[in-house]
Amino acid sequence: MDDFANPYTVHCLQYDNFPNVCANLTGTALSECHTTKSHSYYSSAAMEFEIYCRPGWKDFRPAFVQYVGVLIGNIILGYVADQMGRKKTFILSMLIGIPSLSLSATFNSIAAFYFFRALTGIGIAGTMIVGWAYFSELVSPHQRFKLRTFSNWANARIMLTLVALLTGEWRLSSHVSACISLITLAIVYFILPESHIWLRKKGRYEEAEESRKRIAALAGIEFVPMPPPEKVENAEPEKAVNILTVFGDPQLRKNILILWLMWFVTGMTAYLTDLCGGDMTANFWIGQFLSGILLSVVRIIMGFADGYLPWMGRRFVLLSCQSLAIFFFGCVIAFLYAGEKGQWYYTAVYLASFVFTSICWEPCYLCASELMPTDVRATSTASCSIVGRFANIGASMLSGLKTIYEPGVHMISISLGLTNVIAAYFFLQETKNCSLDKAGTSASKPVEKANEQEMKDLIDRTVAEDVEKK
């Protein structure tokens, strides 16, 4: 909740020798000066604790400590999910994150606030990375893009902005956000089963059948059993894959390296654009709602278009959106040089650059699931998230360039975007509609494509067997 404070507009009168701009005014003029000069859209933790004003604390910001928690969570929870299961790890993550978020707003101590925000970061890592691996394995290949369409930062941003607007201060916002998160925890705990793909990979076929039965009931379709794979005599046992053996396979090594680059570039450019866009509109709330709503609408359109346009694959989405983002970043730079900042067309191109940069997250998440084997899917996605978090930290450090030479911020985004386009064009493999059960299991064979009918690879209907049973 402290993200609504802008460190570049904070004046620390009791620690620094800033002039009192209202010192020589009286009466109505003094009141108007106070209203104008001390206006705050939101009472954040940074403002309450005066974090940006205290020597020693101003260089150790809340976002940084939360990112540290996310990094720790990515290192630990991705591996745990591959070993213990998706559902258990996801629930564990939420049981860590939800109480920590609420407790961070309970105590009147900066140290306690930082400690619980670090724990919240660990919970965030589990819900984002393990949650994505978990939910992507529960839905059919044709629905994966739609899953990202509705469960994404754009919609969360709209909700968070609305919560912040209605509550007005960070403590109540934290408690409300924790309560909203309890809804997700209840749905996962009481309704959703463990990933059947993960269970079958571990040889727990009876439990996998129960999971598939539950999914069929939720989908409203008839359940048809899927027998365990037949044992072939003298067949070589399937080799177990871990994050270290990934680098021994040429194809998997190429996949993980291109994924790391995609996550780094998108994490850097999207967050840098977001951090530097607080003043793209005169009213802070309008800018936040505009960016969130516009991004959400574009994602919904693309999500439904994905099911009707077979040529709209992961490569196409990444290359086209990254190229459009580069173009609009160029427009932003041109308007800055022309002194047109604040005009409606500057806001329009800035929003466009933010939207198309953020859309690049879709192929990042989708390819992280579709390029890597089930054995290491959560771990490899966690490694991608770690790279992305380092990019976020780098973006937070580079955002200070805005106050020195603002076009330089967008020049960095253009350079990174061009690198992403070139690498993806030559090295990114198309994975649309691939089967996660076999993804990444063979370096010499192309990615196995899913059946044309969406639920067949999930339930494996066998019409002939069904007729015989009747």
Image (cartoon, rainbow, N blue to C red):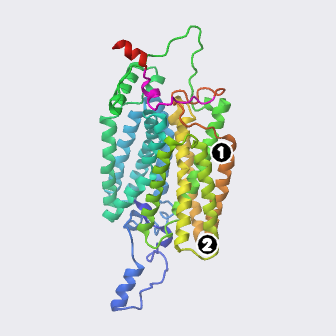
Q: Indicate the position of residue 162 as horizontal and vertical percent values.
A: 35, 60
User: On screen, 422 above or below 256?
Assistant: below
User: Is 6 or 282 nearer to us in this picture?
Assistant: 282
User: Mark 2 belongs to which amino acid?
Assistant: Leu
| Residue position marked by numbered label 2 in the rendering | 336
User: On screen, 325 above or below 73?
Assistant: below
User: Which of disc 1 and disc 2 is earlier in sequence?
Assistant: 2
Label 2 Cα crowd, 10 Å radius (few <14 / some 14-19 / many 20+): some
What span is colored magenta in the figure? 446-461
Q: Main secondary structure of the magenta part?
A: loop
For the point 47% across and 27% down, the residue is 457
Q: Indicate the position of residue 60 as horizontal and vertical percent values.
A: 49, 59
| Residue position marked by numbered label 1 in the rendering | 424
Label 1 Cα crowd, 10 Å radius (few <14 / some 14-19 / many 20+): some
For the point 63% across and 68% down, the residue is 333
Q: Indicate the position of residue 225 as horizontal and vertical percent values.
A: 39, 19
